[in-house]
Image: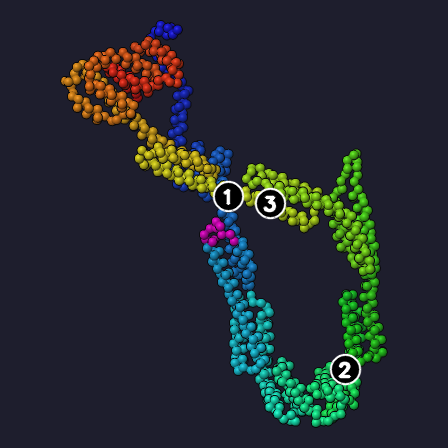
């Protein structure tokens, strides 16, 4: 069926023509590649930022612009390049934008740091530095990413502030310690006089003066200096008093010592004599009175009182005798002592009470002694004199009170203050009745009239307040009625057109809040009506607040549900932000529809915001961790690039393994920052291409070496076979020489080495009939060569075109029958190399061409 193929005339195979357009495109592509490489070299050779900016503006190659953009660092240049490449080169624009954002962030950090330093310098200039100001400065300072010079400057100023705070603390501690020492000296000085006390006091005052003259003295507590000055003055006065009254103290101590030494002679110790002697001693100031001396004196009086009652032989009642035997003081003596003491102190009312007590005593039962009678007479005389003076002074004081009451109306005082002053005047009038006796009727009438006239504005004010309370009461009742009417109308559910209209809870809540505020601003109400009106208002308001509270409980449950939904949102999903915004919008709608009580609203909102903030915090943390992971991936990929670039200088034997491992590591690596993704990919691909070029060159060299070795061994075999056929083997070379030439050639691939070695050995052995087999195998060799050329798609000699066409049909039929098990070109070449056939130069060249 393919016979028509053999009838075609032999003609040369047409050569494919190259279209002019394809040639032009290839030439243009080559020119463009050369220009791109030249632009890349120019960009890599740049060293100045200005030149890089100019190159980016005029370059038309994106890779060259990106390489030149690595030199742009200043903000003006970055902005210029960004403006020029915003719409033309996305990679360069993104790189510029990233660097601008970094610069602006650095500027913001530097500005904050400068503001903190300025604040610290202002604090350094303050006369009074507070620790809370320094604490606030520390809270506002964030040392992360701060330039080194600003960090150092802040550290220096902060150290100076710390020194000032330390100096303030030390100064306050010293001043407080000085005050404590001064107070301790004051307590010790009350017990006795120390010779070193004045000198110590002077030293303490000098130290305090030093503290007050310190640079940080303004930070001392204001009361500290005044307290120290008052304490020092009191101590100095006490020391002076001690020095002045030392003799009086010594006399009291010696008198008590003499009395205590005379305990064995009770007749020498009489209470009246002891009192007289004790009263005759020089008086001491109140601050120098020693409780110990007074207690010893009272103990001696009590000890010797019963011993004196026996010699007088007074006929007293049995009860009095019992009291005397029990060691108790007679009531006459106690009342008399109290009277004298009251007269001495000027306490007229107490003196009158003691005199009444003495007058109520039965002097027959408790007969006073002569000394007591004399003392009583003298005391009553003094009491009468004082009463006269008191009565006169009381009348004078009452006239002053009347005058003060008459002067009140012109002063136009506030009613409350006026009532207070009038009450004070009346209280003082009553106290004069106690201390100075009853007042004359005329004085009382004048004082009462003046107070009544002065009290008239107060009474009018109180009347006005009463009327206002009555008006407030009416307003309260009207407010209660308004709430009741509003509750009936607001809570009524209308069914218009078959649809139930729910109450407007927001309006009800606002109405309740307004009425509560109105009730608070209502003003005072009579106490008799206050409780009833409060209960009525609470009941009326409860009719609205009860349903409102139920609805608010439902609304709280809805808010709780929103909080739960927000808490359960997964933070790592892409639509989480939109869902959070949706929840926030729903929250705002519900808050507008029905406001909750302020405290509950605030609490729920804080919980909801915390749930939302937690989600954004998790997303931010995830983004930060992802950024950190991308930076780590970028670092690892840079290391992989470095390893791959360094492998170019290593032997080519291990390059393939290094390249395979690098590609596996690269494929396993994660994402890197987008700004550096293109650059690092280009770097890796360039390194891979360089390694592959080295490997390809090595393989090409190895293939050429193998081809040369195969050519040499084929030529050697062909030479030996030609010598066998021409019977010149013995004349040309011996077997050792043939083997030497064979061993001098490189070893081939195992398959070809095995076949050619067997062919070589057959040629060396030159068995019987081998030359004839070589001659007879030549047609088969030519046919197998033609078959191999057909399988390889290579050209055959023009003279064999007919045979080639015929053999093509056979090869096609054989391949169709064999299918996947058909012989390939490599197996065909191995078969040709193994054939024992004589090969001329033309056949050898055809075989070598196929092998190449």
- Depicted 276 relative to depicted 548: above or below: below
User: Circle 3 sits on which residue?
Assistant: 611
Q: Is residue 585 left or right of residue 142?
A: right
Q: CA distance from mark 1 to mark 3?
A: 20 Å
Q: Secondary structure at mark 2?
A: helix
Q: Secondary structure at mark 1?
A: helix
The crowding category of the residue bearing disc 3, from other C-alpha atoms within 10 Å (few below 14, some 14 to 19, many at least 20), is: many
Q: CA distance from mark 1 to mark 2?
A: 91 Å
User: Circle 1 sits on which residue?
Assistant: 624
Q: Residue at x 58, y 86 (%)?
A: 246
Residue at the extreme left? 731
Q: Nearer the viewer, residue 514 or 512?
A: 512
Q: Could you tell which of marks 1 and 3 lies nearer the N-terminus?
A: 3
Q: Nearer the viewer, residue 615 or 346?
A: 615
Q: CA distance from mark 3 to mark 2?
A: 79 Å
Q: Secondary structure at mark 3?
A: helix
Q: Is residue 12 left or right of residue 437?
A: left
Q: Nearer the viewer, mark 1 or mark 3?
A: 3
User: Circle 2 sits on which residue?
Assistant: 353
For residue 321, what is the image quadrant?
A: bottom right
The crowding category of the residue bearing disc 1, from other C-alpha atoms within 10 Å (few below 14, some 14 to 19, many at least 20), is: few
Expressed as whole percent of the image width and height from the top left, the position of residue 22 reads: 41, 20
Whether pointer 1 and pointer 3 mark residues with C-beta atoms closer than 8 Å, the reply is no
Q: Could you tell which of marks 1 and 2 lies nearer the N-terminus?
A: 2
For residue 400, what is the image quadrant?
A: bottom right
Q: Could you tell which of marks 3 and 2 lies nearer the N-terminus?
A: 2
Q: Main secondary structure of the magenta part?
A: loop
Q: Which mark is residue 63?
A: none
- Magenta residue span: 141-151
Expressed as whole percent of the image width and height from the top left, the position of residue 451 reads: 82, 71
Q: Residue at x 27, y 21 (%)?
A: 755
């Amino acid at each position: 069926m393919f016979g028509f193929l053999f009838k075609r005339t032999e003609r040369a195979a047409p050569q494919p023509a190259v279209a002019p357009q394809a040639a032009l495109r290839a030439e243009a592509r080559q020119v463009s590649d050369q220009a791109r490489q030249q632009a890349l070299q120019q960009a890599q050779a740049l060293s100045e930022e200005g030149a890089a900016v100019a190159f980016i503006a005029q370059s038309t190659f994106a890779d060259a612009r990106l390489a030149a953009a690595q030199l742009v660092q200043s903000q003006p240049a970055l902005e210029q390049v960004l403006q020029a490449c915003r719409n033309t080169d996305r990679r360069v624009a993104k790189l510029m934008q990233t660097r601008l954002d970094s610069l602006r962030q650095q500027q913001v950090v530097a500005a904050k740091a400068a503001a903190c330093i300025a604040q610290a310098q202002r604090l350094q200039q303050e006369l009074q530095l507070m620790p809370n100001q320094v604490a606030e400065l520390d809270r506002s300072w964030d040392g992360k990413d701060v330039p080194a010079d600003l960090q150092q400057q802040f550290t220096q100023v902060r150290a100076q502030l710390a020194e000032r705070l330390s100096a303030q603390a030390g100064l306050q501690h010293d001043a407080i310690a000085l005050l404590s020492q001064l107070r301790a000296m004051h307590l010790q000085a009350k017990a006795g006089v120390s010779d070193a006390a004045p000198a110590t006091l002077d030293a303490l005052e000098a130290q305090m003066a030093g503290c007050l003259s310190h640079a940080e003295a303004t930070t001392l507590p204001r009361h500290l200096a005044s307290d120290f000055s008052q304490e020092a003055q009191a101590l100095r006065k006490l020391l002076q008093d001690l020095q002045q009254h030392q003799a009086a103290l010594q006399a009291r101590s010696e008198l008590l010592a003499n009395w205590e030494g005379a305990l064995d002679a009770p007749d020498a110790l009489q209470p009246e004599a002891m009192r007289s002697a004790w009263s005759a001693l020089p008086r001491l100031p109140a601050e120098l009175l020693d409780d110990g001396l007074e207690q010893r004196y009272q103990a001696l009086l009590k000890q010797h009182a019963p011993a004196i009652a026996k010699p007088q032989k007074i006929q007293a009642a049995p009860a009095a005798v019992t009291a005397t035997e029990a060691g108790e003081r007679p009531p006459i003596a106690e009342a008399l002592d109290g009277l004298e003491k009251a007269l001495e102190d000027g306490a007229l009312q107490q003196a009158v009470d003691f005199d009444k007590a003495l007058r109520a005593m039965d002097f027959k039962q408790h007969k006073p002694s002569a000394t007591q009678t004399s003392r009583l007479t003298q005391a009553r005389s003094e009491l009468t004199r004082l009463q006269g003076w008191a009565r006169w002074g009381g009348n004078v004081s009452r006239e002053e009170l009347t005058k003060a009451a008459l002067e009140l109306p012109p002063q136009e005082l506030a009613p409350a203050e006026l009532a207070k002053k009038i009450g004070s005047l009346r209280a003082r009038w009553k106290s004069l009745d106690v201390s100075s006796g009853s007042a004359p009727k005329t004085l009382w009438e004048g004082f009462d009239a003046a107070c009544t006239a002065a009290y008239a504005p107060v009474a009018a004010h109180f009347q006005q307040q009463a009327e206002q309370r009555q008006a407030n009461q009416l307003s309260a009742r009207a407010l209660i009625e308004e709430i009741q009417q509003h509750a009936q109308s607001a809570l009524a559910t209308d069914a218009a057109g078959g649809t139930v209209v729910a109450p407007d809870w927001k309006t009800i809540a606002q109405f309740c809040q307004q009425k509560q505020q109105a009730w608070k601003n209502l003003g005072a109400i009579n106490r008799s009506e206050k409780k009833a009106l409060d209960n009525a208002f609470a009941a009326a308001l409860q009719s609205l607040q009860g349903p409102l509270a139920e609805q608010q409980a439902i609304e709280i449950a809805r808010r709780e549900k929103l909080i739960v939904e927000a808490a359960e949102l997964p933070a790592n999903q892409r639509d989480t932000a939109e869902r959070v915004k949706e929840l926030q919008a729903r929250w705002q709608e519900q808050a507008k529809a029905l406001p909750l009580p302020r405290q509950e609203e605030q609490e729920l909102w804080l919980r909801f915001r915390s749930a939302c903030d937690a989600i954004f915090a998790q997303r931010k943390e995830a983004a930060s961790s992802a950024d950190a992971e991308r930076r780590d991936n970028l670092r690892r990929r840079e290391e992989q690039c470095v390893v791959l670039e360094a492998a170019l200088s290593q032997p080519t034997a291990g390059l393939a393994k290094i390249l395979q491992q690098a590609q596996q590591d690269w494929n396993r690596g994660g994402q890197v920052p987008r700004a550096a993704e293109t650059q690092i990919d280009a770097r890796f691909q360039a390194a891979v291409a360089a390694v592959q070029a080295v490997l390809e060159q090595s393989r090409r060299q190895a293939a050429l070496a193998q081809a040369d070795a195969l050519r040499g061994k084929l030529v050697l075999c062909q030479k030996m076979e030609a010598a066998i056929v021409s019977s010149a083997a013995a004349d040309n070379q011996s077997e050792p020489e043939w083997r030497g030439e064979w061993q001098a050639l490189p070893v081939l691939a195992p398959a070809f080495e095995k076949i050619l070695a067997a062919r070589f050995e057959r040629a060396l052995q030159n068995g019987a009939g081998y030359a004839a087999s070589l001659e007879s195998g030549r047609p088969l060799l030519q046919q197998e060569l033609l078959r191999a050329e057909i399988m390889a798609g290579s050209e055959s000699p023009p003279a064999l075109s007919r045979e080639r066409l015929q053999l093509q049909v056979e090869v096609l039929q054989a391949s169709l029958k064999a299918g996947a098990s058909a012989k390939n070109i490599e197996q065909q070449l191995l078969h040709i190399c193994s054939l024992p056939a004589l090969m001329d130069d033309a056949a050898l060249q055809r075989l070598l061409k196929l092998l190449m």
